[in-house]
Image (cartoon, rainbow, N blue to C red):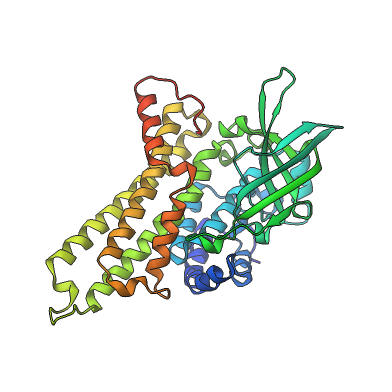
Amino acid sequence: MAGATDSGEELIERARALAPLLAAEAAESERLRQPTDTAIRALEEAGLFELMVPRRFGGRELDLDTFLEVGLALGEGDASLAWVTTFYIEHCWILCQFPEAFQKELFADRSYVLAPGSITPSGKGKREGGGYRLSGRWAWGTGVMHADWVIVGAVLADADGNPDPRFFAVPIGQVEVEDTWYVDGMVGTGSNDMLVEDVWVPEERSMPILPVSAGRGPGAEIHDGPLYRTPMLPILALAATMPALGQARAALARFRTRLGERVLFGGAGRQAEQAAAQIRLARVELGVRQAELLLRDTVAQVMERRDAATVEDRARWAASYATVVDQSKRAIRSIADASGASAHRLDDPLQRALRDVHTMSSHVVFDLDARLELYGRVRLGLEPGLALL
């Protein structure tokens, strides 16, 4: 494994070099319905999972600008494998928000952890003997097939009887993985259900969610770097956005090549000579570029404002991420519409990109109507309610 002193530029170059391997592993990952061991091993050897882990624990402690370039590069290779990778990276950041005693235990002999996570607090827990008794089922366990730990949520009651949503870290040995991942897109993520039955979790393996959501979790006090006082959702949504835009960029590059090579039926010449194809290419290229500029601007704002962000800032960022994914999805659909029937063969990367990005756009953070409504409410001075920000 590479040394943790590597710069962001070196890590980005490794991600770009890995994109062809992820593309090559995509079909096998889809067949297995989980990431291949080859892909995970290559990502580990490149040191990518250490990106957000503090240097004191052997990590690289790099910021969202590096995360952005790494995620986009991997996304050009394969959406499913990039999605698993970016969430593994982001979940290491979440683990660095837990109490310091647990962080020291967790990173005592390693510089990263492979951990799926569920932001839905669907479990049940109660306080018991210096910890918590936890049970529940959590869906969408991205990365659970290679996991060391899992991060799951439950809502307890605090001393005053108020809701106390919390994250819990549970070692994979205390988790049952149920094979439920039969889907039409993002098949290679292996996002099976995670079941925990009557497990006792020590106090230090739990943390309240709300402070972390605002960038004021324990990690903001433990670690000096500004990364650890960044609100959670802008990092989580970035992890989920980059594979979609990466696939749109890759599909666009393949489309330009396809237009130059494809000969239309009936002797009409190359497709590239048709005005309709030229107009579609230009429109798609500008749309993808627009989405990328919006994403880069959003990341720059998050890095500038961090925990000083207002509710309006966070609502705008949430709407921006959803817009980027929507534009990426539309770009890939437009390319597919102009690529002929052969683009729907199972060995053509475009059909997988089409299914994968449509599936990932169903994530709750990418509900575009809800995100635009929320941003509009806030801009009009109305309360956001219990929105996920």
Residue 84 found in image quarter: bottom right
Q: From the top left corner, tell me how far across and down residue 220 is, in percent.
A: 63, 35
Residue 207 found in image quarter: top right
Q: Residue at x 32, y 67 (%)?
A: 253
Q: Residue at x 45, y 54 (%)?
A: 359
Q: Residue furthest top?
A: 160
Whether residue 112 sits left or right of residue 344 in the image: it is right
Q: From the top left corner, tell me how far across and down residue 306 is, in percent.
A: 51, 34
Depth check: 10 or 32 in front?
Answer: 32
Q: Residue furthest bottom?
A: 267
Q: Residue at x 63, y 70 (%)?
A: 37
Residue 32 against residue 303 in the figure, above or below? below
Quadrant location, the N terminus: bottom right
Tag count in the figure?
0
Residue 129 against residue 323 in the figure, above or below? above
Q: From the top left corner, tell me how far across and down residue 254 is, in percent.
A: 33, 70
Q: Residue furthest right?
A: 129
Q: From the top left corner, tell me how far across and down residue 92 is, in percent.
A: 64, 49
Residue 13 against residue 241 in the figure, above or below? below
Depth check: 84 or 162 in front?
Answer: 162
Residue 7 visible? The answer is no
Whether residue 315 sits left or right of residue 227 in the image: it is left
